[in-house]
């Protein structure tokens, strides 16, 4: 049996319209030592929390009201409009269609998980963004993590 990882001293922003989903994700995060979990029901409020609290990680749903997940990611990844453009973003998708995944990657998400997901799935994505962070590159006005294959090739060279 694999031990539960721990990620103490981190703060996370969880953004989903569903209070139920936010509470489930909060519980999953608290089980690995992330005690400061901030929540927002929509993208607009999430941008405010991002600016005010500067969390270490954001876990955001694609389908949000007021300001969509796509718009939030675009604003969060633009250095001119974001207080922390390199914040790791884990995207939750209820329907992970190829075109949405491609758009999300192009905008600069670090990881994608399909709903519903297990705690182990979330923890593995947290492990990726915390213990194996990828460098960022600027593409037009957006900061995006360098794809895994490219960053692995740079590490070998």
Image (cartoon, rainbow, N blue to C red):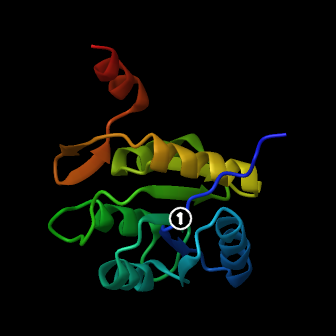
Residue at 23%, 53% in the rendered image: 142
Q: How many marks?
A: 1
Q: From the viewer's perspective, tell me whether residue 155 is left or right of residue 139.
A: right
Q: Is residue 85 above or below residue 137?
A: below
- Taking the image as drawn, is residue 86 in sight? yes
Of residue 54 and residue 97, the one placed in the foreground of this image is 54
Residue at 71%, 57% in the rendered image: 115
Residue at 33%, 15% in the rendered image: 156
Q: Secondary structure at mark 1?
A: strand
Of residue 135 and residue 115, the one placed in the foreground of this image is 135
Q: Which quarter of the picture shows residue 44?
A: bottom left
- Taking the image as drawn, is residue 100 in sight? no
Residue at 78%, 41% in the rendered image: 2
Q: Is residue 19 above or below residue 21?
A: below
Crowding near the residue tagged with mark 1, few <14, some 14–19, many ≥20 C-alpha atoms within 10 Å: many
Of residue 85 and residue 126, the one placed in the foreground of this image is 126
Rendering coords of residue 87 (x, y %): 36, 60
Which quarter of the figure is the N terminus placed in?
A: top right
Rendering coords of residue 58 (x, y %): 47, 66
Which quarter of the figure is the C terminus placed in?
A: top left
Rendering coords of residue 55 (x, y %): 41, 72
Rendering coords of residue 63 (x, y %): 56, 68
The residue where tag 1 is placed is 59
The residue positioned farthest toward the right in the image shown: 1
Q: Is residue 93 above or below residue 148?
A: below
The residue positioned farthest toward the top in the image shown: 157
Q: Is residue 37 above or below residue 63?
A: below
């Amino acid at each position: 049996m694999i031990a539960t990882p721990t990620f103490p001293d981190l703060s996370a922003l969880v953004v989903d319209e569903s209070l139920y989903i936010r509470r489930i994700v909060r519980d999953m995060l608290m089980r690995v030592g992330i005690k400061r979990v901030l929540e927002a029901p929509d993208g607009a409020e999430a941008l405010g929390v991002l600016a005010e609290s500067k969390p270490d990680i954001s876990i955001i749903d694609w389908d949000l009201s007021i300001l969509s997940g796509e718009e939030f990611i675009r604003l969060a990844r633009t250095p001119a409009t974001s207080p922390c453009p390199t914040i790791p973003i884990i995207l939750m998708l209820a329907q992970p269609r190829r075109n949405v995944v491609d758009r999300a990657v192009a905008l600069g998400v670090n990881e994608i998980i399909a709903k519903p997901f297990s705690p182990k799935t979330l923890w593995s994505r947290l492990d990726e963004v915390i213990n194996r962070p990828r460098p960022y590159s600027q593409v037009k006005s957006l900061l995006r993590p360098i794809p895994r294959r490219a960053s692995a090739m740079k590490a070998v060279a």
